[in-house]
Amino acid sequence: MELNRQNAELALKEASESNPGAWADHSRYVASACKNIALHCKNLSADKAYSFGLLHDIGRYVGVCSEKHLIEGYRYCMKRGWEKAAQICISHAFMIQDIGTSIGEFDVSDGDYLFMKEFIASAVYDDYDRLVQLCDALALPTGFCLLEKRFVDVTIRYGVHPATVDRWKKILEIKALFEKQIGCSVYTLLPGVVENSFC
């Protein structure tokens, strides 16, 4: 099955019915941010970027979980032949390609952990991976926000880990890379970012 915007929207709708939660609205804002930025990048498809953003947390359809949603999302997308989306289901959480930089709990089997460890280390990231990593940090379930607000939101929920600051630095580096491509601040492409960041 070819991945397109309609299939991705249907998948998220069904997944959010299986496990209702704020994660679905977060995913919609991530998708919108991906699309808005991709529209200004000559080598990216806005529709692909939107679809990848919608699906990055699709593994949460299995229920409340931590890092399990990464491997479950990978399986969900691979089953449908959506290989790049499957990679992003894992890669979005690893802007640093080292499983040791995870901030979540590995509520997975030993076999799944080893698969993810090798997958992360050997994956070849492109601008779609990096775009979803960035936009994941620009979106709350209530709308777009400053990176720093999202950093604090995630840290309050997951705690401070040895890789926390390095992860922040990597996201800021990715932001700078995209801003060089688009020639403006990413925030100018995110409607309501000021209001949602300071509400």
Image: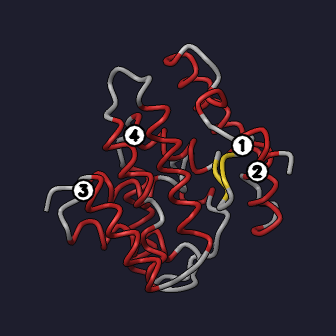
Q: Distance between the residues labelled 1 and 4?
A: 19 Å
Disc 3 element: helix
Q: Is residue 197 above or below residue 172?
A: below
Horizontal side, residue 168 vs residue 19: left or right = right
Q: Tell me the residue that label 4 is attached to.
A: 128
* Label of residue 168 in the image: 1
Which residue lies most toward the left here?
Answer: 1
Q: Distance between the residues labelled 3 and 4?
A: 13 Å
* 139 or 100, nearer to the observer: 139
Within 10 Å of disc 3 (Cα), the crowding (few <14, some 14-19, many 20+) is some
Disc 1 element: helix
- Residue drawn at x 64%, y 51% is 139
Amino acid type, callout 3:
Glu
Classify residue 21 by image quadrant. Answer: bottom right
Q: Tell me the residue that label 2 is attached to.
A: 151
Q: Tag 1 or tag 3, which sits nearer the N-term?
A: 3
- Residue drawn at x 81%, y 60% is 160
Q: Distance between the residues labelled 2 and 4?
A: 21 Å
Q: Tag 2 or tag 1, which sits nearer the N-term?
A: 2
Amino acid type, callout 2:
Phe
Q: Are marks 1 and 2 in contact (CB under 8 Å)?
A: yes
Amino acid type, callout 1:
Trp
